[in-house]
C-alpha cells in the first residue's frame, strides 16, 4: 500500500508526541506498519515542534515535501507553517486558538488574524476542519486533553485506517486511569465534530 | 512500571520503540551489567530509560559527572569482565576522547560499547561534527543502524564483535535514528553478569611508554581482524530496489532509508549496498559489488568518509567503475539529508523528472510568519537571574559588559531583552572564557553556568580562575536538575540516577572551600534582592560566585499540580497603563499584548510573580 502520511505541528509542550504515538501504537496493535519521527531537546522549550507519522511500508520516518495526507495542527500559525508538507489533496485539522510567540509581543512580525489563516488554508488544501480543541478540553475539565480532541477529529475524517475502538484501547493503556473518562470524552468530542462536518 | 516490556519482553515479542529505547533493549539482550552516561540530546532518552529499568533488570546505572568519567566507569567495568555500555551525544565524545583513545590501545575483556549520538543539522547542539572520524582516529570498529529494530539488533552484535576483538566498539546513531519510532521485535535476554574480577596485567592495562608502543602495533593487528569481520558481516548487505538495477549505491545509517524511498518515489531500479558495519569498510566486497554495476554512487550525511575510502581503494586496485559522491551528485557536506534532497540528487543525476504529489504542492503563506524559536519557559527562574543582572548593570552604569555563557536552557537568554550570551564554546566554557575576557579586556565579565554543567566541567575551570586571580561574576543557575535534556539528576542532588538517596554536594560550600572571596545564594524570583546581590558581586576584585537557586519551573509545576496548589497572575486592565515594561523586561511567553495593554495567558502562566515585581503601577497580581 502507498503510505498514509500524517504530519503534526504545534508548540513545544502541547502533547504532540503523545498524540502521535497513540495513533502509532494503535496502528501497530491493528497490524498496520508505523514509523514516526519525533523532536526532542531544545525545540521542546516553547518552540515550533513537529512530529511525523507514516503508516504502511516506508523506510524514512520523515514525510517528503508536499506528501502529507493529513496535517494535524495544534496552533494556527504552526498549521500554516506546515503547508510545506501539503498538496492540494491534503486534509487539514487545526486548532483555532493562537499561542502568541514572544517574538510578536516584543514587536516582531504581527500575528495574522486567525480567520485569514483559515481562509488561506482553505484556498490551498482539499478540506480544513477548524477545531476549538483547547476550549473543548477545558469544558471537559482536562485542558491537557486538547491533543486527544484533535486525535478524535483526525479519526472523524476516516482517513486513518483504524477503528476508533482501537484508539480507545490504546488510550486506556497510555493515560492514567483517573483521566481516562475525560480523555474518552475528548476523543468522542473531536470525532463527532469532523464526522458530522 | 513504564518500559516494563523492555525488561520482561520475550523473544518474538514486539513493541513500538524510539531508537534510543531500542538501544536499551539491545544492551539488555546483550546482558550488560554496567551502564554510565552524561545526558545529552539526541542520546538522553537512553539514560531516561535506564533510570527506570536498571534496577528491575539487574543492571548498575549511573549518571557520571561528565562523559569522560562515564566512559572510564564503563571501561574499567568491562576490563573486569562485565559487559558495559556508555552513551553520549557527539560532543560528549570530545570530552571523553582522552580516555577513549587509550581504551583502544589497552583493549577490553568483556564487551564494551561506546555509543555516540550525532546531531547533523544541529537540532540541539553547538556543532554538527561527524563522529565517524573518531572510529578512524582511535582505530576501533564502528556500527551504524538505520532504524529502531537495527539499533536493537546491532547492539547485541556490537558486544560480540567487541569480545571477539577485545576492543571497544563505537556505535554511532544520528538524531533521526535515535528519535525514530518503529516496531521492534525482541530477541532473548542473555543473563546479566553484574560483577567480575579484575585480573591484573600491567603489560596490557598500563600504557607507560614501554608498553604503549607495542600496544599500537597490536591495535593495528586487531583492526585488520576487524576488517575481516566487516567483510563477512551480515550487517553489510545488498538490497535490490526494483529489478535489474545497473547502478550501485553504497549508503549507511538513516541515509539508507532516504535512498530506498527516493528510488521508489522516482521509479528507479538500483542495487543498494547497505553498510551497517561501517568501519573498517568491507572494501573487498564493495569492489566486487562495483564490478557488477555501471557506476557506483556513495550517499552519506556530512563528511565524504566512505566515499574517500572507496575512491582511494579503487584507485589502488585499478577498479574502473566510476564513483560518484558528494561533489558529483551535488549532495551537501553540511546538514542532514532527507528523501527530498536524495531524490533531487538522483533525479538530477539520472535525468528523470521529480515526483509531483497528487494535485500539486500547496503554496506557502506569502509573507513571513511570526517566528517561534525555543524560549525560556513561563516561570523559568533564569529569567529572574538575567533580569537582576541587567538591572544591576544599568544601575551601576557598567559599560559594555561581556556575557560568557554555557550549555543549557539558559543559553536561550541569548535573545532580547536579556542578550545574556555573548560567547559560548562547550560544556563548562563559561568559566575559562570569562577569565580570558578578563585578562584580555577592561570589560566587566558576567558568566553563567548551570548546576549540572558546573560539576561537568566548571569545577577545575573555577580552581584555575581563582588561582590565576581572574575577576568576574560567575552565576551558577542552580535549578536543581539537568533541565535541557529532560531533568536528569546531578551531583548537587539528593537522589541518584536510579532514584536512590545520594550525598548532595553543595555548590556554595564548594565555592567557599575553593577560596572564592564572595559567595552568595539568591532566589531569582525576588528581583530586588537579587539585583542588590549582583551590585555587590560586580564590585568584587576576584571571582564572585552567585548561586541562583530555584527549582526548574517545569519540575515545580509538576509538584504544584500534584499537590493541587496552583496560582496564576493576571493584569488589572483598569490599572495597566500599557507601558509594556513587563513585556520588554521579562519577555515571558505567558504575557502578550492585547489592545495596547498587557495580558496574561492563564494556561501558560506558572505564577512565578516576576512580572508583578517589574510593573511600575502594580497592575499585575495573583488571580483571585
Ligand atoms: S508593566 Fe504593568 S502597566 Fe506596564 S504594560 Fe505591563 S502590566 Fe501594564
Ligand atoms: S507570573 Fe508573570 S512572569 Fe511569571 S509565569 Fe506568570 S506571566 Fe510569566
Image (cartoon, coloured by chain):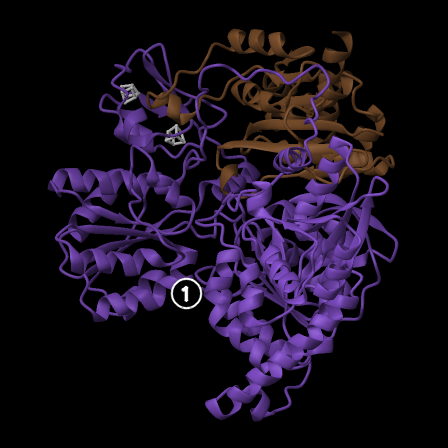
> In the rendered image, what is the letter of the chain coloured brown?
A
Residue A92 in sight here: yes
User: Where does residue B26 sit, x and y in percent of width and height?
Assistant: 74, 60
User: Where does residue B51 sit, x and y in percent of width and height?
Assistant: 62, 58
User: Where does residue B4 sit, x and y in percent of width and height?
Assistant: 76, 53
Mark 1 beta carbon near ligand 2 (under 8 Å): no
Specify the subunit that label 1 lies on: B
Residue occupying image coordinates x 70% and y 21%: B357
Between B404 and A167, the residue placed more toward the observer is B404
Q: Quadrant of residue B330?
A: top right
The residue wearing badge 1 is B505
Quadrant position of the C terminus of chain B in the picture: top left
Please indicate whether residue B338 sits to the left or right of residue A48 in the image.
right
Please indicate whether residue B433 sits to the left or right of residue B379 in the image.
left
Please indicate whether residue B465 sits to the left or right of residue B590 in the image.
left
Please indicate whether residue B543 sits to the left or right of residue B355 in the image.
left
Relative to A69, residue B114 above or below: below
Between B305 and B463, the residue placed more toward the observer is B305
Relative to B260, residue A150 above or below: above
> In the rendered image, what is the letter of the chain coloured purple?
B
Residue occupying image coordinates x 83% and y 59%: B187
Determine the secondary structure under disc 1.
loop
Ligand 1 - quadrant of the structure image: top left
Amino acid at each position: 500500500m502507498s503510505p498514509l502520511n500524517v504530519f503534526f505541528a504545534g508548540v513545544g509542550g502541547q502533547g504532540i508526541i503523545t498524540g502521535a504515538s497513540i495513533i502509532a501504537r494503535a496502528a501497530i496493535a491493528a497490524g498496520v506498519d508505523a514509523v514516526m519521527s519525533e523532536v526532542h531537546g531544545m525545540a521542546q522549550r516553547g518552540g515550533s515542534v513537529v512530529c511525523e507519522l507514516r503508516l504502511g511500508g516506508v523506510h524514512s520516518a520523515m514525510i517528503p515535501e508536499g506528501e502529507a495526507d493529513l496535517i494535524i495542527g495544534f496552533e494556527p500559525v504552526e498549521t500554516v507553517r506546515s503547508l510545506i508538507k501539503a498538496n492540494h489533496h491534503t486534509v487539514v485539522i487545526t486548532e483555532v486558538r493562537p499561542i502568541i510567540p514572544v517574538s510578536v509581543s516584543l514587536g516582531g512580525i504581527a500575528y495574522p488574524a486567525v480567520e485569514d489563516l483559515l481562509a488561506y488554508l482553505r484556498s490551498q488544501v482539499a478540506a480544513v476542519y477548524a477545531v476549538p480543541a483547547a476550549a473543548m478540553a477545558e469544558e471537559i475539565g482536562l485542558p491537557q486533553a486538547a491533543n486527544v480532541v484533535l486525535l478524535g477529529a483526525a479519526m472523524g475524517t476516516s482517513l486513518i485506517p483504524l477503528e476508533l475502538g482501537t484508539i480507545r484501547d490504546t488510550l486506556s493503556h497510555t493515560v492514567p486511569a483517573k483521566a481516562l473518562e475525560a480523555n474518552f470524552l475528548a476523543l468522542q468530542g473531536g470525532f463527532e465534530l469532523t464526522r458530522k462536518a | 512500571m513504564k518500559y516494563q516490556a523492555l525488561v520482561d519482553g520475550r523473544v518474538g515479542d514486539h513493541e513500538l520503540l524510539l531508537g534510543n529505547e531500542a538501544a536499551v533493549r539491545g544492551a539488555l539482550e546483550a546482558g550488560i551489567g554496567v551502564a554510565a552516561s552524561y545526558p545529552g540530546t539526541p542520546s538522553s532518552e537512553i539514560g531516561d530509560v535506564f533510570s527506570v529499568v536498571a534496577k528491575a533488570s539487574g543492571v548498575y546505572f549511573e549518571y557520571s559527572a561528565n562523559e569522560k568519567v562515564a566512559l572510564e566507569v564503563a571501561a574499567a567495568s568491562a576490563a573486569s569482565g562485565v559487559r558495559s555500555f556508555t552513551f553520549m551525544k557527539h560532543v560528549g565524545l570530545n570530552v571523553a576522547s582522552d580516555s577513549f583513545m587509550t581504551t583502544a590501545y589497552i583493549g577490553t575483556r568483556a564487551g564494551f560499547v561506546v555509543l555516540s549520538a550525532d546531531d547533523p543539522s544541529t537540532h540541539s547542539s553547538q556543532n554538527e561534527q561527524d563522529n565517524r572520524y573518531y572510529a578512524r582516529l582511535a582505530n576501533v570498529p564502528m556500527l551504524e543502524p538505520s532504524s529502531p529494530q537495527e539499533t536493537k539488533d546491532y547492539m547485541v552484535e556490537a558486544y560480540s564483535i567487541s569480545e571477539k576483538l577485545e576492543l571497544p566498539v563505537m556505535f554511532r546513531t544520528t538524531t533521526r535514528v535515535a528519535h525514530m519510532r518503529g516496531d521492534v521485535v525482541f530477541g532473548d535476554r542473555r543473563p546479566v553478569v553484574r560483577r567480575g574480577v579484575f585480573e591484573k596485567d600491567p603489560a596490557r592495562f598500563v600504557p607507560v611508554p614501554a608498553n604503549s608502543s607495542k600496544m599500537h602495533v597490536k591495535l593495528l593487528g586487531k583492526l585488520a581482524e576487524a576488517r575481516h569481520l566487516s567483510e563477512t558481516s551480515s550487517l553489510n548487505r545488498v538490497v535490490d530496489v526494483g529489478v535489474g538495477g545497473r547502478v550501485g549505491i553504497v549508503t549507511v545509517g538513516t541515509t539508507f532509508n532516504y535512498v530506498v524511498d527516493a528510488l521508489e518515489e522516482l521509479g528507479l531500479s538500483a542495487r543498494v549496498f547497505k553498510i551497517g558495519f561501517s568501519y573498517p569498510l568491507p572494501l573487498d566486497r564493495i569492489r566486487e559489488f562495483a564490478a557488477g554495476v555501471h557506476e557506483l554512487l556513495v550517499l552519506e550525511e556530512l563528511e565524504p568518509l566512505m566515499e574517500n575510502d572507496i575512491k582511494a581503494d579503487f584507485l589502488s586496485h585499478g577498479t574502473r567503475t566510476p564513483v560518484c559522491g558528494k561533489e558529483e551528485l551535488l549532495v551537501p557536506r553540511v546538514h542532514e539529508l532527507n528523501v527530498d534532497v536524495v531524490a533531487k540528487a538522483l533525479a538530477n543525476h539520472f535525468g528523470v523528472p521529480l515526483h509531483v504529489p497528487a494535485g500539486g504542492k500547496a503554496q506557502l503563506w506569502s509573507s513571513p510568519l511570526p517566528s517561534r524559536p525555543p524560549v525560556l519557559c513561563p516561570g523559568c527562574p533564569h529569567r529572574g537571574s538575567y533580569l537582576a543582572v541587567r538591572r544591576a548593570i544599568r544601575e551601576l552604569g557598567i559599560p559594555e559588559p561581556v556575557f560568557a555563557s554555557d550549555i543549557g536552557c539558559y543559553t536561550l537568554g541569548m535573545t532580547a531583552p536579556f542578550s545574556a550570551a555573548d560567547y559560548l564554546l562547550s560544556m563548562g566554557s563559561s568559566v575559562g572564557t570569562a577569565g580570558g575576557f578578563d585578562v584580555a579586556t577592561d570589560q566587566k565579565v558576567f558568566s553563567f553556568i548551570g548546576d549540572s554543567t558546573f560539576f561537568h566541567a566548571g569545577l577545575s575551570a573555577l580552581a584555575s580562575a581563582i588561582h590565576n586571580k581572574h575577576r568576574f561574576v560567575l552565576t551558577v543557575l542552580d535549578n536543581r536538575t539537568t533541565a535541557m535534556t529532560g531533568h536528569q539528576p546531578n551531583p548537587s542532588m539528593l537522589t541518584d540516577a536510579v532514584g536512590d538517596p545520594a550525598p548532595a554536594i553543595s555548590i556554595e560550600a564548594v565555592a567557599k572551600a575553593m577560596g572564592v572571596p564572595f559567595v552568595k545564594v539568591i532566589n531569582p524570583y525576588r528581583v530586588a534582592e537579587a539585583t542588590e546581590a549582583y551590585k555587590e558581586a560586580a564590585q568584587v576584585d576576584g571571582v564572585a560566585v552567585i548561586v541562583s537557586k530555584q527549582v526548574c519551573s517545569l519540575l515545580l509545576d509538576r509538584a504544584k499540580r500534584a499537590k493541587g496548589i496552583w496560582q496564576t497572575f493576571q493584569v488589572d486592565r483598569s490599572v495597566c497603563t500599557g507601558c509594556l515594561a513587563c513585556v520588554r523586561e521579562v519577555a515571558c511567553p505567558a504575557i502578550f499584548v492585547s489592545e495596547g495593554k498587557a495580558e496574561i495567558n492563564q494556561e501558560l502562566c506558572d505564577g512565578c510573580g516576576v512580572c508583578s515585581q517589574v510593573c511600575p503601577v502594580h497592575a499585575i497580581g495573583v488571580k483571585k
